[in-house]
Amino acid sequence: MLTQALGSLRVRAPTPGLFDITEKVSGWLDSQRIADGLLTLFCAHTSASLVIQENTAQAARHDLERFFERIAPEDPALYTHNDEGPDDMPAHIRSALTQTELTIPVQAGAMALGTWQGIFLFEHRQSPPDRRIALHLIGEGE
Amino acid sequence: MLTQALGSLRVRAPTPGLFDITEKVSGWLDSQRIADGLLTLFCAHTSASLVIQENTAQAARHDLERFFERIAPEDPALYTHNDEGPDDMPAHIRSALTQTELTIPVQAGAMALGTWQGIFLFEHRQSPPDRRIALHLIGEGE
Amino acid sequence: MLTQALGSLRVRAPTPGLFDITEKVSGWLDSQRIADGLLTLFCAHTSASLVIQENTAQAARHDLERFFERIAPEDPALYTHNDEGPDDMPAHIRSALTQTELTIPVQAGAMALGTWQGIFLFEHRQSPPDRRIALHLIGEGE
């Protein structure tokens, strides 16, 4: 029988950039009684986002971070909005270019991630605050 | 008991750029008998898209629009496809860089949006037509 | 009564770029007993992605591909990560800028796509391998 569950995670990245939250998400999933279904993660912020990326090569994550620094630099001359400092507007742009939410099929108790896929919080602020990720799971039990 | 509802919104942005549709979406949600669940918005167009962004600072939305004008400019020299004018191809690119659909958890009758998050139609055409946003809601009643 | 179905597609793009998988997805949907609901596609890779784009004008797809070649070029001087060749890091970046998953409402047996929308696998590797797309469908039968 189909059921659903709502939850949330609170995470804080140690530094700006990609922060692996795959285990935290898996941990929450493991605590639910749904083995097959659909999991949604929703980042309740506009200066942090979600992205599924390479889970092994640190250099790949570093290069991805550099790309976003090049494309949306912390250059006040580019922006009129600057309320919270030079990282404010780049944070909104980098969020818009990545994901606010991710929806992932769940099969036999595990997310349908590929071998090299991890789930990352993409923290865009220089002084990372706590971030809230809302979770929704719908599906059937074991 | 889990139920679902399908619906649609018709919206027209007054100008190109970010157009706040949070209230329209909330209004539809309020008219349904589902308090906890998952809401999906799907933009049925390739020259308009969806984005969750800062809901207060107009300057932030302005800067975001300028960013997309810089990164995907209306410059016919850059594109071969030009069937519907110089805003045609930039519209497709800006859509591909943002979202065609958004999936948002619903809890106690409200979307799990953060304090500073709004839902925006990102209109990319210079003469905005009516846009259709398909809606799907699944969950449980009060 | 609400039910769900899990499945997967295996697809291989003939060349890098946008590869139309709309018919393959529709074919799977047609084989299910759910007429109204929500369909999720999840690309289990970090060097290929999903995008909903113009389904008719080949020039538009060509221009979109050129845009991603300009914005994330195969230029080894830009990246430190290079394990699998010069197309490795651009592939991760182009994936991060587009979608790993798509969620699409289904109504009367068909996806709620607009007239000009198609679903594309965006293949980023020069020698495209087989790609796995996990599918989840939830909804009600005819």
Image (tube, coloured by chain):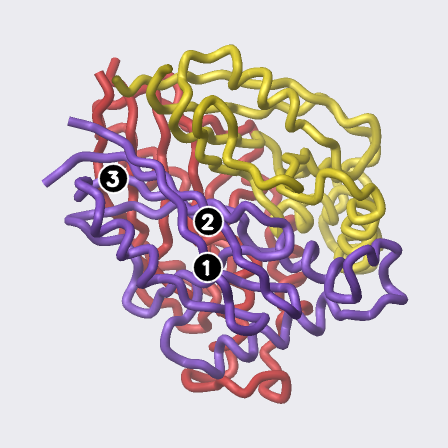
Chain colours: A red, B purple, C yellow
Residue B94, placed above or below residue C124 = below
Disc nearest the viewer among 1 and 3: 1
Residue sticking out furthest to the left:
B142
Front-lying residue, C30 or A11: C30
Element on which disc 2 rests: strand
- In the rendered image of this protein, does residue C126 appear above or below residue C91? above
Residue C94's place in the image compared with A70, above or below, is above
The N terminus of chain A is located in which quarter?
top left
Return the disc, 2 or 3, that comes first in the chain's sequence: 3
Read off the residue under disc 1.
B11
Circle 1 residues within 10 Å: few <14, some 14–19, many ≥20: some
Badge 2 and badge 3 both on one subunit: yes
Going from the N terminus, do you reach mark 1 or mark 3 first?
Answer: 1
Residue under label 2, please give it. Answer: B133
Left/right placement of residue C100 relative to residue B21 reads right
Does label 2 lie on the same chain as label 1? yes
Give the position of the C terminus of chain A as an image quadrant.
top left
| Label 3 crowd (10 A; few <14 / some 14-19 / many >=20) | many
Mark 3: which amino acid? Gly
- Return the mark for residue B37: 3
Name the residue at 54% across, 52% down. Answer: B99
Q: Residue at x 60, y 60 (%)?
A: A65
Quote the CA–CA distance across marks 1 and 3: 24 Å
- Report, in whole angstroms, how far the alpha carbon at label 2 lies from the one at label 3: 19 Å
Does the CB distance between marks 1 and 3 fall below 8 Å? no
Residue occupying image coordinates x 79% and y 64% = B85
Q: Amino acid at mark 2?
A: Ile
Could you say where residue B48 lies in the image, as x and y percent from the top left?
58, 57
Amino acid type of the residue tagged 1 in the rendering: Val
In the figure, is residue B136 to the left or right of C113? left
Do badges 1 and 3 share one subunit? yes
Mark 1 and mark 2 in contact? Answer it, CB < 8 Å. Answer: yes
